[in-house]
Image: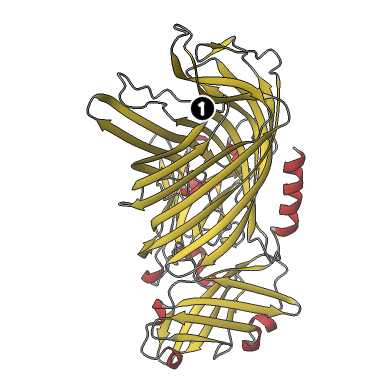
Amino acid sequence: MLLAAWTLAAAAQTVGLFHLDRVANHPSVSGKDVSIQVTSNGSPVPPESVLTTPASWTITVRGPGNVCFSGPPSKAPAYDPFTGVTTLTVDHARFGATDPAKCFWQVALQSGAARYSASQDPAESDNFSLGAVSATVMGTQVLLRVRVHGVPPPGSVLSNGAYWRVLAADSDGNRKAIQPVERPVYAPMSGVVTVSLPTAALGPVNLKDASWSAAFLPPDNTLTSTPGSAASSALQQAKSRDDADLYVSGSYIAGVGTKPIWALDAKAGYSSAPEKFPVLNWFVKSSPANLRFGIYGEITANPDAQPPVDRSQVDPDSILAYTTLFQTVRLPLNPFFYGLKWEVQPVGGEFSRKYPASNLISGGRVRFIKVLAAEKRWGADLIPSLGFEGGKNLNQPSTLFLRPVDLHNYDTIARFRTGADANFYLYRRVPTPGDAYAFTLTGSWIARVPFTPEPFTTTAYLPSLTDPTMTTRQQIVEMRTNTRHYVQIDAVWYATKLFGFQTEYKYGSLPPLFEFVSHQVSVGLQFKATYPQNHSVANPLP
């Protein structure tokens, strides 16, 4: 809990600070001018005189046809204080015959001693769209929160209630549409538009079981938004196994004279706003930016089967079930890390289905996001982490793997956990929201350092328990305090948004019995997805 308190304090100090968010992917061309939009949020905002002065900005452009230049905008920037969007203009002649949309853009803003920067994010869509909708009844008013994505239209359009339409419906079939709504309020930091509706205007709709949807319908049809809904089941691509809400990886090996050998790696869970969960809703009344609560389960199976065999088991050797509270925070003034993600695991369990082995575990960790590269077609990041795991052992069997073991001192669990994730992304030529990655290469390393002895399972050639004259390869369990490493590398080519062909490498051991896997390589299929409302991360490589 000290770890959580420290990270919450860091979040409180950084989450509200002004920063440039990203550069739009698609510039607009009008005669001799090429314009690009830059989103920003946080406070205190630099003076408007700074934001609208060309000398305060530096635009860097690289692209095909030897296009490479850096300098101030050709015209005074236009800043919209309602949305935090700044429009910068460059002379079209600087691109020659090259299409400006094929170039990679970066910008920097100098305000006194402070310097802010941003670049394009090919995995993010510029198109303004609506996401999940939630409602809170407050006396005679209903407060409707609509999550939005993309580059917002001008504030004069976004704040006009005549362009918003809200539909409420209950389980009895009563429906009521309201347009216009009272003046909307946009919060760039959380990506939420809030509107207020009088309960009297909703007529016969039962607000206790009402479902809500919203639509943004401005007069310019190029700004038309997709409607938002209170219940959305859309799935998007996940960066990695650690980031996924739904994950299944499987491989199959078959040969003459042997039964099939299977390997399985799966993860499933759901995250949502903390105020929707019992107990947590006593403390969290509304969702701060990016704060999520999830319930997850994970299964990892590393079958120890070598041809020829007469049977093959896929019994999991590591099962995890846990709750987690997590939040991603930008660090706009940190020169090295782009952001951090803190996670607290109030309660969880470690199990092995094959054997009576289980632990009750709590803990937390902090992950620091370091962007290594953010180019037009590819990106890379490094995410080191520090954490702690502690709990209690629930089982002390006298035998494991048919051999006697002494676990009478196995009680308290305390581990230091460190590690790092490294990710390389190759984007599709035409990325779309939720479908940006054509290829990913991810590597994960975890090191658990026990402060108290815990089981460690390896293999050795020992006399058979049934026939001492024969030596066989057997699994043995020892109580040790050695560091337990686990390395996993995945290379995935995505045939569709959620399915891909995978090559996977594993080395190391996972709790509770830390069964050691030595250099296992498999080829198979992978399904990996995330719920878009759960991972609104402050990372230029989403």
Type of residue at label 1?
Ile
Q: Residue at x 43, y 74 (%)?
A: 26
Residue furthest toward the front? Answer: 469
Residue 222 falls left or right of residue 444: left
In the foreground, 153 or 172: 153
Q: Tell me if residue 82 comes above or below residue 324 in the rendering.
A: below
In the foreground, 23 or 384: 384
Q: Tell me if residue 39 comes above or below residue 148 in the rendering.
A: below
How busy is the neighbourhood of tag 1: few (under 14 within 10 Å), some, or many (20 plus)? Answer: many
Q: Position of residue 289 (x, y in %)?
A: 62, 52
Q: Position of residue 107 (x, y in %)?
A: 57, 77
The answer, for residue 503, to whether it is visible in the render is yes
Dot 1: element:
strand
Q: Position of residue 501 (x, y in %)?
A: 33, 47
In the foreground, 9 or 466: 466
Q: Tell me if residue 492 comes above or below residue 24 in the rendering.
A: above
Q: Which residue is mark 1?
A: 319
Query: Which quarter of the rendered picture does the N terminus lie within?
Result: top right
Q: Residue at x 58, y 84 (%)?
A: 77
For the rendered model, the colour scheme is secondary structure
Q: Position of residue 20 (x, y in %)?
A: 61, 70
